[in-house]
Amino acid sequence: MFLPIYSPLQLGKLGANSAHLCGLLPCSGISWSMTRGITSPSLSGDSTQFATKGSVPYADVLWVNPVIGQFSTEGLPDTGQTLIPSLHNFTYDSDFYVTNAAVTQALEFDVAVYINGLAMFWGTQCANLGDGNWDYLNDATQQWVSTGFPCNFADGWNHVTLQFRRLAGNELQWSSITLNGATAYVNETSAPYRVPSSWYGITVNYQMDGVFKALLNNTTYLDNLTFTYW
């Protein structure tokens, strides 16, 4: 099913140095905002602005939208728990606008599935100022792994499409990533990890990572974000 994200990425949580989770505001040394209904820059006339500022080195801001299951923003609570178990393919597709690549350590585009006490978290980042490649998060080790495929977004508009699969035994597969028309066939896999059995749902996430000197003021935009599942 094709799902346009009409409620763009509700604010979730924030992490600094990938080790300290501050939770929702206030959070010392870092602040962020999300503004809907932006007409410029925009391709559709209705983009969403994401802004970060502060003084914490390598600080991350993660926005989370629970699209299916618990707390669904799209009217899909799946209370009978019949939809999510049937899904095995996921596509994250979006335009994104970068105002200053020089202060954007990485941009992260994720899909997460929580079911039967397991988390399948397709963490995927364009490590712009890191290794310069697409990286994926190995769920079993909780370590970022380079795919070896280069990722270089540009200031201005970019377009990304990510294809993920849930394989037999709930194994995760990163199938392919397409950035500005160039496709990398990743085909990397990972085992899931354990979470409380009460967790149930699918989230679509977006994260901005700051540079090593500090989280300098930075702004990006998302437009035409869609999530397709079957």
Image (tube, rainbow, N blue to C red):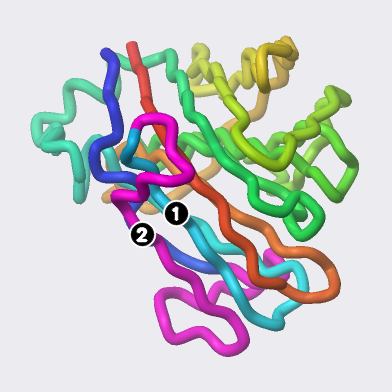
Residue under label 1, please give it.
49
What's the residue type where badge 1 is placed?
Gln
Spatial CA span between label 2 and label 1: 5 Å
- Magenta region: 15-44
Disc 2 vs disc 1: Cβ atoms closer than 8 Å? yes
Residue at 22% x, 39% y is: 69
Which quarter of the rendering shows the N terminus? top left
Residue under label 2, please give it.
35
The answer to which of 88 and 153 lies nearer the viewer is 153
For the question of whether residue 224 can be seen, the reply is yes
Which quarter of the rendering shows the C terminus? top left
Compared across the picture, whether 194 is left or right of 37 comes to: right
Residue 223 is drawn in which quadrant?
top left
Residue 217 rendering spot, x and y as whole percentages: 65, 71
SS class of the residue under badge 2?
Answer: strand
Vertical arrangement, residue 220 with respect to residue 93, above or below: below
Residue 178 is drawn in which quadrant?
top right
Residue at 43% x, 68% y is: 33
SS class of the residue under badge 1?
Answer: strand
